[in-house]
Image (cartoon, rainbow, N blue to C red):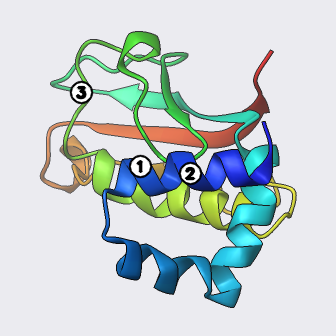
Amino acid sequence: MERRDLIEIIKRRLALSEDEFQAIEQNAKYQRLFKNALEASRFKLIAEVVESKGCHSGHKVGQKLVFDSTGNLLTRESPERVCAFLMPNLTVLINVFFENLMNGRDPNEVIFNRTGCFDVGVGCGGWGHVVVEMRAVPIK
């Protein structure tokens, strides 16, 4: 796929007017995004459960939530049930990986690549807690 093809795909997905999209296309930061997006599309983002205790949604250690490089949950590759209380903190990590990819950096250059759900666990007045570790993996 060529750069122009990618831009056309993005343009169709956003469904913006020609003027609106032109403002994006001419913006220097989006030029960088368009330059790096093809390489970025060769990755998936994996959030693997590394700790789980008392999870009402049933998240278990080893379970993987799979996202494309732009942050879309790939439902066919992820658990049937995904806890909504895990997603807000996970979204922050997805954004960090996305930023690295769109800036042409190694997506795994994230030092703090773990997060967890809002539930604080039984010891702190909740009833469970889940921790996930995020990484970018090349698509085979």
Element type where label 3 sits in the image: loop
Q: Position of residue 80 (x, y in %)?
A: 26, 12
| Quadrant position of the C terminus in the picture | top right
Callout 1 amino acid: Arg
**Vertical placement of 31 versus 80: above or below?**
below
Q: Are marks 1 and 2 in contact (CB under 8 Å)?
A: yes
Q: Residue furthest front?
A: 18
Measured along the vertical axis of the image, is residue 101 above or below residue 74? below
In this view, the mark in front (3 or 2)? 2
At horizontal 76% and vertical 74% (from top left) the residue drawn is 32
Q: Secondary structure at mark 2?
A: helix
Question: What numbered label is drawn on residue 55?
Answer: 3
Residue 15 lies, in percent from the top left, at 31, 57
Cα gap from disc 1 to disc 2, whole angstroms: 6 Å
The reply, left or right, for residue 107 in relation to residue 61 is right
SS for callout 1: helix
Q: Is residue 111 left or right of residue 134?
A: right
**Which of the two marks, 1 or 3, is nearer to us in this view?**
1
The residue beneath circle 1 is 12
Q: Is residue 52 visible?
A: yes
> Which residue has dot 2 on it?
8
The amino acid beneath tag 2 is Glu
